[in-house]
Image (cartoon, rainbow, N blue to C red):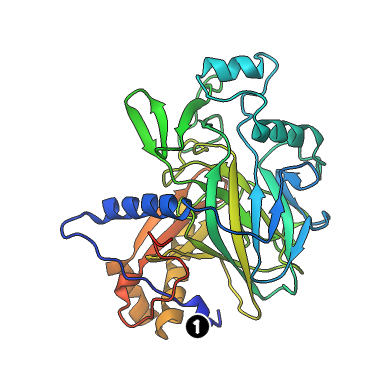
């Protein structure tokens, strides 16, 4: 990538002596998600969850943009989810009551989700999959450009989420019938998910799917399940409020989609789902003309993130290493003979997910490694 100065930023946090790196990373993720979501950001456009604004299970190239914006504008987007109980064997109100969920079937997000499931146009005979919003076009975006997506806020719309598993998901296949999904009630005031009495999971809401229109060679109705060069179903838990996602552009307008709302997820997403919920996400879009990316990248106040994606986990790891080396080369003007040893001694590689056919690895490149790169990242944790 021919990298511009505004894409090269840094932030140098101070860690308490003796705090393990993994614990510090987890604390940063929680602080980042919590503080960035505290104040509702201003926005230029508001996209509601409706059948006309939605697509299910794929990225339909034939679907006209639901909104066209200018570079630098901000969009608030309502997304759907939480209707996994939908089946003929149980009344929705009964299901909510049985699971001690503090809402009713009249919850607007649930009613909108049901309407989307009933009325959204299907493409290529794809009946199910991620509930997506899009495409949103950015004026002037063309193939070879890149799109900077600043994640300003991610807030759950419903007070619960579900985590399921089933045949074909994870490493070890389950025998017998698909087990019921685990229901987690969300305490949004305390920012925790109540797994059961005495067991709580800190929340860090993010969107599992954020991507541009896939390349033309992927076909006009590519499934939303596997991620790719365009981003999509990355399922990276670091894509919380305060993080930036950089995406290649493969089609005029870029054509951005989002969906697959999560309240929190662990690296690996080992059962195939996180805490699946419905979120409202607010995003700022910045177009970078002529700035070409081979793969998605991300940036937090404390780290640069590179991705590797492949059906084979070893190949995904190799691609993540290659992308990490390229990222560092662009930051420092180095070649691989410097960037590779630095990556081995100072960069952590994590399994993003193993359940989306195309497996993911992401690297966490600490900004503290680079003492001479100016800190001009747009978001500072704790800033109001």
- Judge by depth and name the residue closer to the eye, 305 or 280: 280
Question: Residue 307 placed where, x, y %?
Answer: 49, 62
Residue at 46 percent across and 37 percent down: it is 188
Q: Residue at x 70, y 16 (%)?
A: 88
Q: Quadrant of residue 328?
A: bottom left
Is residue 219 placed above or below 108 in the rendered structure? Answer: below
Look at the image and tell me in which quarter the C terminus lies: bottom left
Q: Position of residue 107 (x, y in %)?
A: 64, 29
Measuring 37% from the left and 59% from the top, which residue is drawn there? 382
Which residue is most to the left?
18
In the image, taking residue 302 as reference, residue 71 lies left or right, namely right
Percent of width and height locating residue 97? 55, 16
Q: Who's the residue at 33% across and 65% down the image? A: 347
In this picture, is 65 found above or below 125? below
Q: From the viewer's perspective, is 250 left or right of 12?
A: right
| Residue that carries the numbered disc 1 in the rendered image | 5
- Name the one closer to the observer, 126 or 316: 126
Q: Residue furthest bottom?
A: 333
Q: Nearer the viewer, residue 290 or 280?
A: 280
Residue 309, above or below 81: below
Asked if residue 310 can be seen in this view, the reply is: no
Q: Residues within 10 Å of mark 1 (few under 14, many from 20)?
A: few
In this view, the residue in front, 122 or 50, is: 50
Residue 281 seen: yes
In what quadrant of the picture does the N terminus appear? bottom right
């Amino acid at each position: 990538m021919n990298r511009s100065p505004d894409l090269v930023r840094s932030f140098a946090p101070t860690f308490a002596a003796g705090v393990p790196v993994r614990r510090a990373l987890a604390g940063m993720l929680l602080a980042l998600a919590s503080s960035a979501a505290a104040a509702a950001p201003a926005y230029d456009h508001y996209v509601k969850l409706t059948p006309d604004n939605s697509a299910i299970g794929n990225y339909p190239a034939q679907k006209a943009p639901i909104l066209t914006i200018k570079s630098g504008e901000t969009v608030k987007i309502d997304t759907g989810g939480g209707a996994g109980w939908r089946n003929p064997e149980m009344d929705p109100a009964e299901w909510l009551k049985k699971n001690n969920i503090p809402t009713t079937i009249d919850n607007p997000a649930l009613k909108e989700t049901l309407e989307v499931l009933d009325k959204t146009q299907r493409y290529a005979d794809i009946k199910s999959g991620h509930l997506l919003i899009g495409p949103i076009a950015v004026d002037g975006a063309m193939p070879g450009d890149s799109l900077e997506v600043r994640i300003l806020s991610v807030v759950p719309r419903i007070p619960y989420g579900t985590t399921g598993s089933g045949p074909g998901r994870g490493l070890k296949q389950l025998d017998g019938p698909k087990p019921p999904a685990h229901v987690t009630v969300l305490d949004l005031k305390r920012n925790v998910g109540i797994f059961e009495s005495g067991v709580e999971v800190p929340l860090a809401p993010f969107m599992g799917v954020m991507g541009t229109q896939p390349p033309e060679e992927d076909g006009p109705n590519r499934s939303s399940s596997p991620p790719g060069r365009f981003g999509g179903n990355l399922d990276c838990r670091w894509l919380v409020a305060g993080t930036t996602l950089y995406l290649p552009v493969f089609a005029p307008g870029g054509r951005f989609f989002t969906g697959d709302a999560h309240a929190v997820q662990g690296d690996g997403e080992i059962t195939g789902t996180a805490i699946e919920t419905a979120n409202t996400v607010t995003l700022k879009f910045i177009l970078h003309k002529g700035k070409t990316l081979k793969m998605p990248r991300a940036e937090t106040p404390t780290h640069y993130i590179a991705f590797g994606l492949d059906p084979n986990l070893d190949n995904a790891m190799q691609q993540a290493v290659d992308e990490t080396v390229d990222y560092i080369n662009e930051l420092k003007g180095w070649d691989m003979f410097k960037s590779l040893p630095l990556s081995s001694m100072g960069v952590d590689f994590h399994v993003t997910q193993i359940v989306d056919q195309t497996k993911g690895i992401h690297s966490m490149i600490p900004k503290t490694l680079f003492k001479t790169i100016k800190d001009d990242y747009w978001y500072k944790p704790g800033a109001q």
